Amino acid sequence: MRHDAVIPGQTRIHLPSPSAPQSQDAYAFASSSNSPLRSGDDAYIPTSDAEVRRILGLSPDQELSLRALPDPAPGQRPGQSIPTLSQLAILGSPNKRLTLQEIYQALEERFEWFALNKDDKSWQNSIRHNLSLYKCFRRIQKPITEPGKGSYWVVD
């Protein structure tokens, strides 16, 4: 159901029903390679392991990681959104936490497209932006005993 909003002197706009829930279909569309939302503007990011598995079509025995995703065509960008890829990179790491550089590295190691475009800062900027934007990602300080700069990112 749609509602029309009319602002005097303005163009009519169509708004979705306020009772329309987010659905798996909406998430699948936002994550698909044909979606304009694909590059990180998802309105919905699943937070529980069970929900991530359900949406990505993974069985309970499959590891939640970048390796669980299908391979894209050679040289093609994966069809999942940047938040989804970041989430799976973190969840698939041994300690369930990664620095920003480690997230970049995980994507470059798993998907040829990221390795071929490692000098393109747009996807790296998108990851940084999405980590700060979505509440499911939380930044935690590295202990002072650990070398290197930056913080860790975890999935809440």
Image (cartoon, rainbow, N blue to C red):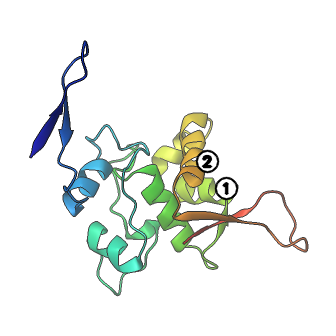
User: Mark 2 belongs to which amino acid?
Assistant: Arg
Q: Earlier in the sequence, mark 1 or mark 2?
A: 1
Which residue, given by chain and number where applicable, does mark 2 sit on?
A: 128
User: Mark 1 belongs to which amino acid?
Assistant: Leu
Q: Secondary structure at mark 1?
A: helix
Residue at the image point whose x is 41% and y is 78% from the top: 49
Q: Which mark is residue 90?
A: none
Residue at the image point whose x is 19% and y is 55% from the top: 20
Q: Nearer the viewer, residue 131 or 15?
A: 15
- Reply above or below: 28 against 124: below
Mark 1 neighbour class, 10 Å CA radius: few under 14, some 14 to 19, many 20 or more: many
Q: Nearer the viewer, residue 112 or 65?
A: 65
- Reply above or below: 84 against 123: below
**Residue 71 x/y as whole percent:** 35, 58
Please identify the quarter of the rendering in which residue 109 is found.
bottom right
Residue at the image point whose x is 24% and y is 50% from the top: 29
Which residue, given by chain and number where applicable, does mark 1 sit on?
A: 100
User: Are dots 1 and 2 in contact, CB under 8 Å?
Assistant: yes
